[in-house]
Amino acid sequence: MSRRDPPRPRPRRLEEALLEVARRELEAGEPRPEVWETALRLARGDDRRAVSAYLRLRVRALLAAHEARARNGETT
């Protein structure tokens, strides 16, 4: 795929599965500290908004890791 090709759409189930991973991290009280700090900063200290920001940021990070593994030929 060249730099000019549009990105391929991601399977919805993958995004949903990664969202569940992020939700479980929060429910267990074990969010990734660096992601939580960023989320809290983006939410200007509002915990409810920080949860939404955390989920969005964490899913984005998990997707990036998944795509990197796929580019390197690793299986998940």
Image (spheres, grey):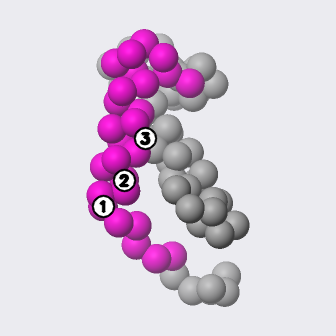
Disc 2 marks which amino acid? Glu
- Asked whether disc 3 touches disc 1, contact meaning CB atoms under 8 Å apart, the reply is no
| Mark 1 closeness class: few <14, some 14–19, many ≥20 residues within 10 Å | few
Q: Could one spot residue 67 in this view of the protein?
A: no
Q: Nearer the viewer, residue 3 or 71?
A: 71
For image coordinates 34% across by 18% down, the residue present is 27
Q: How many numbered badges does the structure rendering display? A: 3
| Mark 3 closeness class: few <14, some 14–19, many ≥20 residues within 10 Å | some
Q: Residue tagged by mark 3? A: 56
Q: Nearer the viewer, mark 3 or mark 1?
A: 1
Q: Residue tagged by mark 1? A: 12
- Asked whether disc 2 touches disc 1, contact meaning CB atoms under 8 Å apart, the reply is yes
Disc 3 or 2, which lies upstream in sequence? 2
Quadrant where the N terminus is found in the figure: bottom right
Task: Give me the disc on residue 15.
Answer: 2
Which span is picked out in magenta? 7-32
